Amino acid sequence: EPIEWRDGYVLSDVPFDQPVASAEAHEPDYPPLERELIDDLGPASQPMAAGSHPFPVPFVRRYSQLTFNLSAYARLLMEDFLQAGGELYTREFAHPRQFGDLREKILINATGYGARALLGDESVIPVRGQTARLIPQPEVTYGLVWRGHNLNVVPRRDGLLVQAQGAHDFNNADGTPDRAASEAAVRELAKLFATS
């Protein structure tokens, strides 16, 4: 499935109403827009009692969210686009003025971080992070977020994504791969499943 509901678990060493000392502390305070504007679009997360989950942490919440299996979703979108007569061509833009040279009447700007340079949009902030991709494990159908450990795991059909962010990753445009950071994130994940 290109898009599907997946469960996940937020893990914490401290109660959820307490802040965690982590690398996220350097980021700005974000307005609670997600909670204010779309909180009712999905199921609310639920606390899990100790002993009702396999994780070696005292506080766990279970959540459900939509997951995009990007390879399948991109393939579906591309097939639909081409079957409807769409064409692909490569074009480089040095300035937004050049948008007017396009023959298309509708333009969707999906340049992501590239919008910062192309459109001079300084509100687009880079956030460096390191992602490790593990082999597909169809039996792993849940995500993980470990508060205070800067660890995110996203279950996708084309492989598990293990994401980590460090203390200096916010507003950091460095795209250099960091194998050591990826390996450290995988080791952090392994701690959750270590048996004694």
Image (cartoon, rainbow, N blue to C red):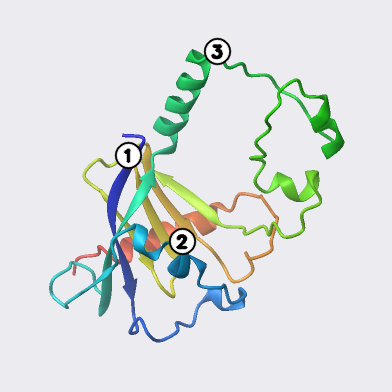
Q: Residue at 51% x, 68% y: name it.
A: 33
Q: Residue at 63% x, 40% y: name it.
A: 110
- Is residue 150 shown to the viewer in this render? no
Residue 128 quadrant: bottom right
Q: Position of residue 133 (x, y in %)?
A: 43, 45
Q: Position of residue 45 (x, y in %)?
A: 29, 67
In the displayed structure, 104 sits above or below 135; it is above
CA distance for labels 1 and 3: 33 Å
Left or right of 115, for residue 11 = left
Mark in front: 1 vs 3: 3
User: Which residue lies most toward the left here?
Assistant: 51
Q: Which residue is mark 3?
A: 85
Left or right of 31, for residue 113 = right
**Of callouts 3 and 2, which one flags the residue occurring earlier in the amino acid sequence?**
3
Q: Which residue is mark 1?
A: 136
The circle on residue 184 is 2
Density class for disc 2 (Cα within 10 Å; few <14, some 14-19, many ≥20) is few
Q: Position of residue 83 (x, y in %)?
A: 48, 14
Q: Residue at 59% x, 71% y: name it.
A: 167
Numbered disc 2: secondary structure: helix
Q: Position of residue 41 (x, y in %)?
A: 36, 57
Q: Are marks 1 and 3 in contact (CB under 8 Å)?
A: no
Left or right of 106, for residue 98 = right
Mark in front: 3 vs 2: 3
**Of callouts 2 and 1, which one flags the residue occurring earlier in the amino acid sequence?**
1
Density class for disc 1 (Cα within 10 Å; few <14, some 14-19, many ≥20) is some
**Of callouts 1 and 3, which one flags the residue occurring earlier in the amino acid sequence?**
3
